[in-house]
Image (cartoon, rainbow, N blue to C red):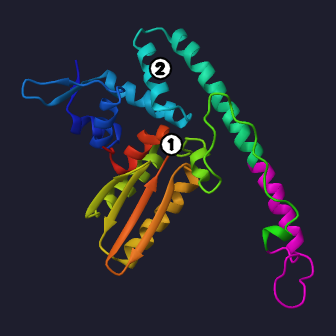
Amino acid sequence: MTTYRISQLAERSGLPATTLRYYESAGLLPAGRTASGYRRYGEDAVQRLEFIASAKLLGLALEEIRGLLDTRQDGACASVRARMLPLIADRIRDAEARGAELRAFSAHLAAVHASLSGPAPEGACGPDCGCTASGAPAAGPVRAPLSPTRPAPEPAAEPWRDAPVACTLGGAELGERIEQWRALVGRADGREEIDDGLRLSFPPDAELAGHLAALAAAEQGCCAFFDFTLHLAPDTLRLTVRAPENAAGMLADLFGATT
């Protein structure tokens, strides 16, 4: 039987060892131990990681994935499907609700665009010029009803909390993105765990700040549930990353497991 050390499994799967350890602590990836205490993984570990990656792309939470893996252990695909179907149905409702929000917001933007395309008033901006919310044709998108299985959203100031936990990248693109973050995170000289995420400290460097900002923008393009804050001061450069609780696995993929 083929077995892997953690470094070998990391190389085989394209995931950092920190993520593998996190999956073990979350009950997703059991590991045996050698007499000297080193982790050993069986061939099934590769298949489990493929299943986890696929389920995460569907937006499933780690607790849901753990339940599916437990069912999968019984060896009956029909049982996995039966457990998976209602979870996917929930995600369809989530996506449809999010789509309704985006369509409403798009209509709002179109109305504002039409208003701004008309003749501008003489002089400074005023309450009816269309540049501020009070002069806009609509107050903003109306939020669609939430699925009964989802918690109420946080205030609108933190829209990332209500974004679907799903990534549009896959395969080689996802592996490349992980490597890009790994390279930048490796340059951090400090790390602090915070509520919902972490804060990384770097030497003050404008060029590095530009790389971090560009990568954070690219990440939000495929994973809108991440929230990034970049602070550049004369004596430090700080990157704060937050994500919903059910995105902890993806947070660990990119930035290492939180404690």
The residue under label 2 is 68
* Earlier-in-chain disc, 1 versus 2: 2
Q: Nearer the viewer, mark 1 or mark 2?
A: 2
Q: What kind of residue is marked 2?
A: Leu
Indicate the quadrant where residue 26 lies.
Answer: top left
Given the current orientation, which residue lies at the most extreme left position?
Answer: 36
- Residue 135 point in image, percent of width and height: 85, 70
Element type where label 1 sits in the image? loop
Q: Which residue is at the far right? A: 119
Relative to 139, 248 lies left or right: left
* Depth order, front residue of 23/120: 120
**Residue 37 in the image: above or below residue 137:** above
Please say whether residue 39 is visible from this viewpoint: yes
What's the mark number on residue 236? none
Q: Residue at x 79, y 72 (%)?
A: 132
In the displayed structure, 149 sits above or below 138; it is: above
Marks 1 & 2, CB-CB < 8 Å contact: no
CA gap, disc 1 and disc 2: 21 Å
Split into 4 quadrants, where in the image is the C terminus?
top left
Q: Residues within 10 Å of mark 1 (few under 14, many from 20)?
A: few
The residue lying toward the viewer, choosing from 75 and 130, is 130
Q: Which residues are magenta?
A: 102-131
Q: Residues within 10 Å of mark 2 (few under 14, many from 20)?
A: many
Residue 24 lies left or right of residue 156; in this view the side is left
Q: Is residue 179 left or right of residue 8?
A: right
Task: Name the element at disc 2.
Answer: helix
Amino acid under label 1?
Gly
The percent coordinates of residue 165 (x first, y second) are 55, 41
Q: Residue at x 77, y 54 (%)?
A: 105
The residue pinned by badge 1 equals 170
What is the x, y in percent for residue 258? 33, 45
| Position in image of residue 99 (x %, y %) | 73, 43
